[in-house]
Image: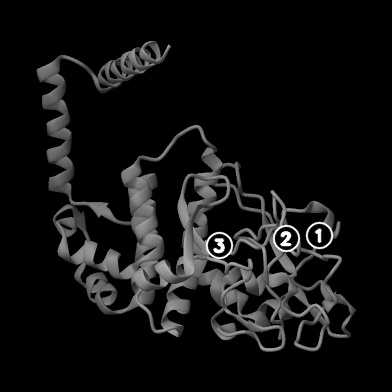
């Protein structure tokens, strides 16, 4: 069992960062080999290795929704308390999706490390990213056709300071993932990761509204708040959710987690996972038509007019500053 953590021993301006798929920011540390599930690696991390917990500092540990749920339950905290105490905001790599990372101590260390000899105090509920090391997974669906199957393979990161590779333990990538509990985390994170990868494929050509960002952040970090949004707001007057699903997500956090992925896919990318009620959709279409009739402008013409107004405001501000 490895208690190995993230990448990065020295803190620099561009300090090493662990991504959602375990990608290493320093390519020189990646062994130039594609690995499969049946490929073998020699590695073991335990309190007896000289470098134990050295890699738990000056790092950026991105938390998935499942990570947050498991960690806060382990610590007996509600989502708001956990987020305030142990995380800080960030943007997910190559996207404008807001997320959170573990807030490091003043010494730049992970707050869950007890000591060099004791290691991680929440080891059995440690984040997904921590479980991957030193194995990363590459996914080349990014930027590809929507119906094109993603190519996945594995790679190994070998940092100069890491002595785990000098241990005599041999196992396959498949065995490593099973031992580290990665397969379960991958299943729990799959829907959310698909949202992130889909957003990455857009690049920065299209930006999210602030409302969409807030929705993504809430659904990704605070299931309690999301549950309140679903049951205590006008949400159910707009969206068609069957009673069986409502019964499941009302009490079960895992069901709520999985529902959140479908909801975000529908809200952000227009999928049919969670549908708007037909009568609501019809009313919106009629409202748009009426506005077009009243103004005599199509949606494209109104968008262009709005753009020109914004441009005029910008020009006025620039003139005032010159």
**Label 2 vs label 3, nearer the camera:** 3
Looking at this view, is 294 or 163 the one in front? 163
SS of the residue at dot 2? strand
**Distance of mark 1 from mark 3, alpha carbons?**
24 Å
Q: Quadrant of residue 46?
A: bottom right
In the displayed structure, does residue 275 sit left or right of residue 106? left
SS of the residue at dot 1? loop
Q: Quadrant of residue 240?
A: bottom left
- The answer to which of marks 1 and 3 sits earlier in the sequence is 1
SS of the residue at dot 3? loop
Where in the figure is residue 84, as x and y percent of width and height? 40, 67
Location of mark 2 (residue): 153
Point 12% across, 33% down: residue: 286
> In the image, which disc is placed on residue 34?
1
Q: How is the image coloured?
A: one colour
Q: Is residue 295 visible?
A: yes
Establish if 115 lies above or below 144: below
Q: Badge 3, how many Cα within 10 Å: few under 14, some, many 20+? A: many
Q: Is residue 271 visible?
A: no
Looking at this view, is 242 or 136 the one in front? 136
Where in the figure is residue 54, as x and y percent of width and height? 74, 73
Point 35% across, 40% down: residue: 209
- The answer to which of marks 1 and 2 sits earlier in the sequence is 1
The quarter of the rendered structure image containing the C terminus is top left
Where in the figure is residue 18, as x and y percent of width and height? 65, 61
Point 68% across, 73% down: residue: 5
Q: Are marks 1 and 2 in contact (CB under 8 Å)?
A: yes
Q: Quadrant of residue 183?
A: bottom right
- The answer to which of marks 2 and 3 sits earlier in the sequence is 3
**Distance of mark 2 from mark 3, alpha carbons?**
21 Å
Location of mark 3 (residue): 62
């Amino acid at each position: 069992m490895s208690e190995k953590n993230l990448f990065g021993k020295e803190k620099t301006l561009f300090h090493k960062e662990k991504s959602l798929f375990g990608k290493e920011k320093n390519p020189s540390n990646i062994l130039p080999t594609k690995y499969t599930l049946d490929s073998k690696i020699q590695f073991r991390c335990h309190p007896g290795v000289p470098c134990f917990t050295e890699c738990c500092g000056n790092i950026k540990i991105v938390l998935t929704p499942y990570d947050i749920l498991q960690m806060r339950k382990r610590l007996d905290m509600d989502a708001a308390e956990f987020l305030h105490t142990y995380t800080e905001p960030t943007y997910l790599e190559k996207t404008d999706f807001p997320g959170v990372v573990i807030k490091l101590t003043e010494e730049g260390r992970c707050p869950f490390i007890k000591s060099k000899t004791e290691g991680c105090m929440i080891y059995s509920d440690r984040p997904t990213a921590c479980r991957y090391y030193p194995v990363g997974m590459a996914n080349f669906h990014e930027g590809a056709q929507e119906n094109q199957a993603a190519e996945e393979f594995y790679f190994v990161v070998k940092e100069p300071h890491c002595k785990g590779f000098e241990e005599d333990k041999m196992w396959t990538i498949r065995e490593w993932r099973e031992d580290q509990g990665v397969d379960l985390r991958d299943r729990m994170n799959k829907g959310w990761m698909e949202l992130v990868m889909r957003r990455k494929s857009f690049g920065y050509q299209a930006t999210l509204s602030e409302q969409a960002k807030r929705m993504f952040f809430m659904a990704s970090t605070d299931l309690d708040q999301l549950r309140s949004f679903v049951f205590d707001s006008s949400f159910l007057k707009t969206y068609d959710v069957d009673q069986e699903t409502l019964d499941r997500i009302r009490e079960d956090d895992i069901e709520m987690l999985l529902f959140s992925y479908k909801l975000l896919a529908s809200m952000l990318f227009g999928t049919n996972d969670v549908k708007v009620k037909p009568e609501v959709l019809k009313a919106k279409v009629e409202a748009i038509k009426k506005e077009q009739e009243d103004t005599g402008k199509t949606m494209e013409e109104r968008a262009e007019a709005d753009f020109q107004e914004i441009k005029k405001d910008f020009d006025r501000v620039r003139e005032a500053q010159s």
